[in-house]
Image (tube, rainbow, N blue to C red):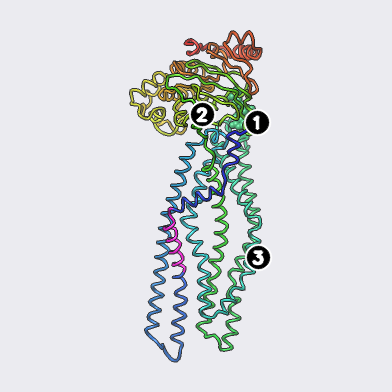
Amino acid sequence: MATGRNAEKRGGGTAHGRNRLLRLAHGHGMALSAACGLSVAAALCGLVPFWGVYEILQATTDGDGPSDPHAVLGWAAAVAAALIGRHLCAALSTGLAHRVGFDILHAVRAALIAKTQRLPLGFFLDRPVGRLSHVFQEQVEILELFFSHQLPDMVAALMAPLLCLTLMALIDWRLAVAALGILPLAWAGNAWMMRGHGPRIGAYFGLIRTINAEAVQFIQGMELVRSFTVRGGAGGGLGGRLVDAIEAFRRFALEWQTRWLPGWSLYAVGAGTAPLFVAPLGLWLHGRGELEAPAFLAALLLSGLLGPPLQKVTIYGELYQRVRKAEEAISAILDAPEPPVAVSGSEPVREGRAFAVAFDAVSFDHGGKPALREVSFTAPAGGITALVGPSGAGKSTAAHLVGRFWDVGEGAIRIGGADIRTIPPERLKAMVSFVFQDSTLFNGSVLDNLRMGRPDADRETVAAAARAARCHDLIAALPEGYDTPVGEGGARFSGGERQRIAIARAILKDAPILILDEPTAFADAENEALIQEALSGLMAGRTAIVIAHRLDSVRHADRIVVMEDGRVAAAGRHDDLMAACPLYRDLTDRQAEVLRWRLPGTQSDVRSGFEQEA
Ligand SMILES: Nc1ncnc2c1ncn2[C@@H]1O[C@H](COP(=O)(O)OP(=O)(O)OP(=O)(O)O)[C@@H](O)[C@H]1O
Ligand SMILES: [Mg+2]
């Protein structure tokens, strides 16, 4: 079955993703090359003093005095210029590379934001928030770090030993060859260190992502954590899992370190021992009168300069692997398949206030697990359709599919006769409003939150919507009224208050189709009554699909669809279902029992607003 998820697994090709990231850098090719060039120039300037001292020594130890005072002065000036030039080049290189790094950081984040707006919402339901925020933050920053610091440094670290060896060869090629004696040891150390490195980098990032995901859940679930914490314990399951994740990371990091440390030590020793190879040969050549003392001294000093850049090269090699992993994670998002929009064979959606929403033999799997099987029903235009059924029956899944959170596996969902896959995403977004059981508000003022529904709405229109949603009085009583910040996630408000603000937002959006997934689930009796009133204002004249846990609240719906195990068990009006559907009767009886169990005084006999209206 070609569901969106299967396609997703096929997508995310990293080769393509790397090309994309290289393309992002490509626009900055000139600046990056200049930064690398300047970095190499800085490395070269670092070698000039050694060469200068060599030349000066040669000039001054030839015979009794300086044979050519001008040459000595010239070299002295060159050394001074190189000392200044080195820092100047390094500063310019850093400046340029940082510009590029931050430009790329910006471009990648912008691309991620743009992409996430086009991705099906199911993409986010399927992934822990912490995992995605890790990509948006840390992994994008790894790229910035790479372009700003590592790339120019790495090029210089690779070039510096070559320059060093070239100068040594100019002095005496045999000494340069002797210096290469470090290679076997360095190579062996490096091979030892890098054994199994690639998979470990993957595991390393995996553990960090787990910590992020657990930390976000831990903080979001703090209420739960507090109420289930055993005294002295780790703070319930969530806290326990976070502690476990941190502990697993510590164990992994320590174990990894003990694995690479011996190889690294061997490499570091190997890379730094060039003078040990150069000195004996130099002494021998000097003894035979084939090598002047200044030349020997200069070559010895130069061979000592080989170690540090070589040590840097392995560190950068390791960091580069991290960059590759970061690229892969970013590409997995940038390359995730977007819901396709078919342009041909579609009936255009007719303009109008209300549309019928039809499920036509819809099947859908959640990651291979069947959630809906051949579901067919029609939510009549302008009417209320209720989805009821036991937990896990597939009600929420069906509701989500109308908004293309995921695409159906088989069958089709039609709005006003048009397959939703043929409706441009922006248009579909404008046509359907969702109100879920726990609405979140984003950081900003109440007004900003409400205007999300319609950015150009004036204050009067916003207030009218808030009145219809029974939250105007509440907002007007706030210290700064509609301009009061809502606090993170809407923390300033109760669940029921947040819900009414979300309903006002939906009223402003004025979409012809409404999907309500247990919108009163978390409300107390008083709030439930207010939310029901708000909803009745919202639903008037629109096509509404309502998922309700309280069957009495949807008793008067135009159509009730009873779902069980991903299938439609029956559909009809309340009375017909009571007569013909044992499952519905059973659900109703059980609910009546639950209601009788309510504590005296808390019973809310809410005859829902939309029930009266229907
Ligand atoms: N994001 C998801 N990933 C994997 N499986 C899921 C996901 N969402 C739902 N499911 C599974 O799909 C099936 C249908 O779930 P769904 O949430 O649609 O049921 P529901 O009727 O809304 O239940 P409830 O009344 O408890 O809200 C269940 O077996 C559930 O475990
Ligand atoms: Mg549900």
35 within the magenta span: yes
The residue beneath circle 3 is 188
**Marker disc for residue 270:** none
Q: Quadrant of residue 395?
A: top right
Residue 228 visible to the viewer = no
State the residue at coordinates (62%, 9%).
578
**Residue extending furthest toward the bottom:** 64
Is the CB atom of the residue marked by disc 1 within 8 angstroms of ligand 1's nearest atom? yes
Identify whether 459 is placed above or below 298.
Answer: above
368, 86: nearer the viewer: 368
- Tag of residue 345: 2
Residue 487 to residue 149: above or below: above
Mark toward the viewer: 1 or 2: 2
CA–CA distance in space, label 2 to label 3: 64 Å
Q: Which of marks 2 and 3 is in front?
A: 2
Which residue lies under the disc numbered 1?
A: 369
Q: Provide residue 276's location: percent of width, then percent of height.
A: 60, 76
Residue 570 or residue 423, whichever sits in front: 423
> Which residues fall within the magenta stretch?
27-43
- Mark with earlier residue (2, 3): 3
Return the x and y of residue 523 as percentages of the image width and height.
51, 21
Determine crowd level at label 2: few under 14, some 14-19, many 20+ residues with C-alpha closer than 10 A: few
Residue 10 location (% of width, % of height): 60, 41
Nearer to us in this view, 378 or 82: 378
Q: Please name the amino acid that badge 2 sits on.
A: Gly
Q: Main secondary structure of the magenta part?
A: helix
User: On screen, 588 above or below 95?
Assistant: above
Chain-order first, disc 1 or disc 2? 2
Q: Which residue is drawn at 58% across and 78% down?
A: 278
Q: Is residue 586 magenta?
A: no
Question: Marks 1/2: CA distance?
Answer: 30 Å
**Disc 3 residue type (three-letter):** Ala
